[in-house]
Image: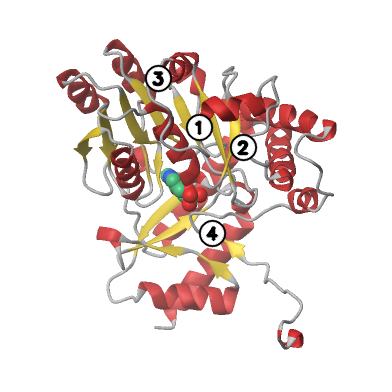
Amino acid sequence: MEATKFKDLEISPRILLGPGPSMVPARVLSALSMPVTGHLDPEFLALMQEVQELLRYTFQTENELTVPVSGTGSAGMEAALCNLIEPGDRVLIAIMGYFGERLYEIAGRYGAQVDRLERPWGQVFEPDEIKAALDKKDYKLLALVHGETSTGVLQTGIADIAAAAHQNGTLVVLDTVATLSGVPVEVDAWDVDVVFSGSQKNISAPPGLAPLTVSPRAREVLRNRSTPVGNWYLDLSLLEKYWGKERTYHHTAPVNMNYALREALRLIAEEGLQARFERHRTNGEMLWAGLEEIDIPMLIPSEYRLPVLTTALVPSGVDALEVRKRLMADYNLEIAGGFGPLQGKIWRIGLMGYSSRPEHVLLLLAALREILSKR
Ligand SMILES: *Cc1c(COP(=O)(O)O)cnc(C)c1O
């Protein structure tokens, strides 16, 4: 092995304006490089409690069972579903894009009888539509996406939907991977049961942890399961013993990722949730106005447009991928393309967490103006 073949690691500090990961503040990166401790070290145990407290603040909940699941947002998704579902359970998934499809895919793998309620990509559900579907059968749970990153829509009316679900004895699972700490997510006020997110979107820590919170109502359902959870690693009955008083070993916590998450959450608390939501909205609106000025229309009407992830229509005759390549090569700037039915038709522009800054909006607009004028 010729070891000199491997050079010192050098990673370019990109301007990340895609659907995640977002840019990570220096304070978070520096927390990441603190010494590794044992996962039962008293200092780490104290840090775990702080992470939980900060997560409750961010989720706007008093839920005791609030933890960062080891793994990315999809691990949170899998944890929510595998813990609630027992083989044969009836489950309703509201699907309006790629991540709704993923919920559907995962629910089926745990043996649920899964029904789909669908909307074409780019639309949202009317709460009444979901209510009507919930009335048709006895569903154990309803799962849906709050901010659908594949299309750029924000599902509104979550509190109404949750109230209707609970009237039918149905639990609500909500994917807030793209929304938590970027747009309001009020777990207790909306009375949603299992809510999960990801560390690398609006929270602006590296990818690798999935914040998750469980209502007392859902915990009761977990306690009364008649079969063991189909996924050992994500079994909350085992995880809660490590994150609760017993401190029983289950798997080694990714300790440094928890340092990073703590620092990212501390930054959220310092900024304040309301100010943070306003910042994301203001920068989103600035982007929308600027795109309209250069004749790039938005895919989604403003009433349910996601301020943290804008889907912009690629003007006719423009090669979407070519523009993205130019943005990266000339401006060091990353945005994403569309996929599925929106492939080649849209750009997906994220203004998430630390990436959501006016100077990034101005740079992207100037870059697009220059690139598109030179065609
Ligand atoms: C990114 C994302 C996920 C998946 O998260 P990973 O961290 O990529 O596993 C799930 N749902 C939504 C809405 C997302 O935006």
Residue 199 placement: quadrant: top right
Q: Can residue 234 be seen by looking at this rendering?
A: yes
Residue at 45%, 27% (x, y): give it. 194
The image shows residue 60 at horizontal and vertical percentages of 57, 23
Mark 1 or mark 2, which has the lower sequence index?
1
Up-down relation of residue 92 to residue 171 (above or below): below
Residue at mark 1: 235
Q: Nearer the viewer, residue 138 or 177?
A: 138
Q: Secondary structure at mark 3?
A: loop
Q: Nearer the viewer, residue 70 or 103?
A: 70
How would you rate the neighbour count of disc 1 (Cα within 10 Å): few for under 14, some for 14-19, many for 20 or more? some
Residue at 35%, 26% (x, y): give it. 157
Q: Can residue 372 be seen by looking at this rendering?
A: no
How would you rate the neighbour count of disc 4 (Cα within 10 Å): few for under 14, some for 14-19, many for 20 or more? many
Q: Amino acid at mark 1?
A: Asp
Mark 4 or mark 1, which has the lower sequence index?
4
Up-down relation of residue 13 to residue 210 (above or below): below
The image shows residue 254 at horizontal and vertical percentages of 68, 45
